[in-house]
Amino acid sequence: MRVLAPAPFRVALFTLATLPGPIAVAVFNNHLYGSPLASGYGTVGATIYAGRYFLTNRAVLAWLVETQTPFILLAFAAPFLLRRA
């Protein structure tokens, strides 16, 4: 049987291994858009506008079904269908 390293060590190692990705994205965004938290989609306020909430969700749901087939909708039912007693 293989002995695993202690859980906190594994979590720290995983965290360190995943940090280069977000750091690279932050550097890239800072270079292109002037801030590590900015993106090409605009400001957070413009992207997540409460007035367009239902319109945006309807469009995203339509795109999801168009690109992934209607069977993807079963994923929304899964928590209710696979409920454990």
Image (cartoon, rainbow, N blue to C red):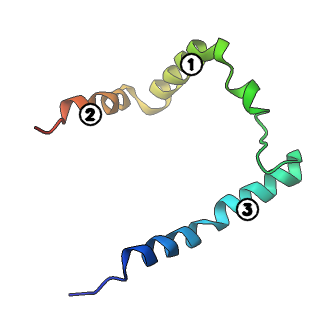
Q: In this view, does 79 lie above or below 24?
A: above
Q: Give SS at disc 3.
A: helix
Residue at image position (71%, 62%) is 23
Residue where numbered disc 3 is placed: 24
- Could you tell me the amino acid type at mark 2? Pro
Q: Give SS at disc 2.
A: helix
The disc, 2 or 3, on the residue closer to the chain's N-terminal end is 3
The front one of 29 and 11 is: 11
Mark 1: few, some, or many residues within 10 Å (few <14, many ≥20)? few
The disc, 3 or 1, on the residue closer to the chain's N-terminal end is 3
Mark 3: few, some, or many residues within 10 Å (few <14, many ≥20)? few
Residue lying at the far left of the rendered structure:
85
Residue 65: quarter of image: top left
Residue where numbered disc 2 is placed: 79
Distance (Cα) linking label 3 and label 1: 30 Å
- Could you tell me the amino acid type at mark 3? Ala
Q: Relative to 80, is 58 on the left or the right?
A: right
The disc, 1 or 2, on the residue closer to the chain's N-terminal end is 1
Residue at image position (53%, 16%) is 58
Residue where numbered disc 1 is placed: 59
